[in-house]
Amino acid sequence: MKLVAVTSCPTGIAHTYMAAEALEQAAVAAGHEIRVETQGAAGAEALNPIDIAEADAVIFAADVDVRDKERFAGKPLVSGPVKRGINNAAAMVAEAVAMAEAAPAEKPEAGSVAPMTAAAPKLGPGAKLRLWLMTGVSYMLPFVAAGGILIALAFLIGGAEINQVVYGGDFEGVTYEAIANPTDILAQAGFAGVLMYLGATAFSMLVPILAGYIAFGMADRMGIAPGVVGGLVAVAIGAGFLGGLVAGLLAGAVVMALKLIKPGQALQGIMRIVVIPLVGVFVVGFIMLVVVGQPIAAAQSWLTDWLAGLSGANAILLGLLLGAMMGFDLGGPVNKVAYLFGVGALASGDLTIMAAVMAAGMVPPLGMALASVLRPKLFTPGERQAGKAAWLLGASFITEGAIPFAAADPLRVIPSTMIGGAVAGAVSMAFEATLRAPHGGIWVIGLIGNWGGFLVALLAGTAATCLAVLALKTVARSETAAEADEHVLAI
């Protein structure tokens, strides 16, 4: 069989490429040919149209909406989350082969177009909602990383008052006038002022981009304009991230409803270019302004005040919860909820939550790497090799570095990473460590407040993960590891 596949995850860093490698290995092992398109952070190197035309079946291992999926029309399609592509690649390949044998794909002659006869498997409401939200998150994350790190560098270079220097306000008894013309920032605020302005500009787009691409995941390109406008309105009225989520879902629903209207052929073009964007922007903007915007803004304000008021035991419990979430699915939806909570707090001026989230996200790969060094006989040769890479991945805040261990032994590894993440998050909050950057791991240590406390949290979480997994594997060793050891000894 000839197969083609597309893999994609919200961040486009690790899951995307791990799923692609797993599918390639599974297909080759089963005696089939496969070409995989990775729609990752570095962009996608599109599949050759000839490979698509000759394919017997298609596999989507994606947590976000696959771009240009119309290319695969007419082909049997197996679709699932990216973690299925990592953990059960052989099953996805076998399912694709079975579907191809049951309903052979049409292979058009060169230059012709496959008929639009195949559709993706039906998803439940929960799966659809997760797909839409993760699509929005995937497009938002580059703005988070770029904007957050530029702002953090601005504070590092220009001092704590650089925000007031650029945008005006009071700081330690000094009143600053806002710089009216952006072209004057370099002269009046220096290089740090430029970094602050550019970073704040990128950060200001988080909510509109999130809303626009949630709507894009629901209704394709026609959902972007109503979603972005709805997100801008959410920012203007103070509804923040909660408003952006509502605006995106609302825009997608409105545009999906408008697309059900089927005018004559002559009006199809004007519907797409004028009517749907016009009506969509107006309806979404009106509802956000007049109906739901203010209650959401009130809820966002309450959440911000609650975060600012957290201290002592309450803060430690929050760090415990967020840390456990970061270690639960290792870059999956639950992990992303905790991460976006930290980003939202960072945007609201609370820097402690982002520090706890990043410490907890670094711990799973580091803990597993340490465990594979201390007790190598408890791990397979492949896991020990993955442990070498996990040191760098963990240090760089790429939680997905622990996935090879979790895929091989989830019942022991996942509880261990949750314990380690919870410890790291709680200790970080207890020390009141702060972080101005939303990413970067150990490489942005200069942007961490109370970095000593942060390192204690990181070491404590790593040790907790390591000790937990060693204890669980010692009490009842995984069959995978035992069989692999016997095989190595036999050789």
Image: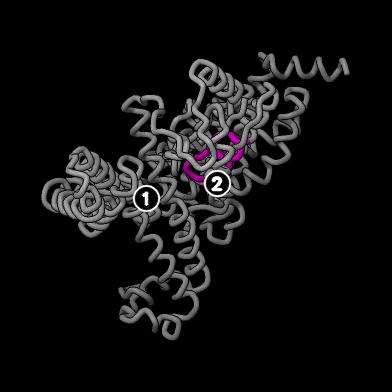
Residue at coordinates 35% horizontally, 31% vertically from top-left?
128
On the image, the x and y values in percent for residue 134 come to 41, 40
Residue at coordinates 74% horizontally, 24% vertically from top-left?
380
- The quadrant of the image that shows the C terminus is top right
On the image, the x and y values in percent for residue 133 come to 36, 40
CA separation in Å, label 2 and label 1: 34 Å
Q: Residue furthest right?
A: 491
- Check disc 2 and give the amino acid type: Ala
**Left or right: 234, with 347 as reference point:** left
- The quadrant of the image that shows the N terminus is top right
Q: Which is more toward the observer, 25 or 169? A: 25
Q: Which is more toward the observer, 387 or 475? A: 387
On the image, the x and y values in percent for residue 303 come to 28, 46
Q: Residue furthest bottom?
A: 187
| Residue 19 covered by magenta stretch | yes
Check disc 1 and report the residue beneath it.
Answer: 344
Ranked by sequence position, the earlier of labels 2 and 1 is 2
Residue at coordinates 35% horizontally, 42% vertically from top-left?
217
| Residue 36 covered by magenta stretch | no
The residue segment tinted magenta is 5-20
Check disc 2 and report the residue beneath it.
Answer: 46
**Left or right: 290, with 257 as reference point:** left
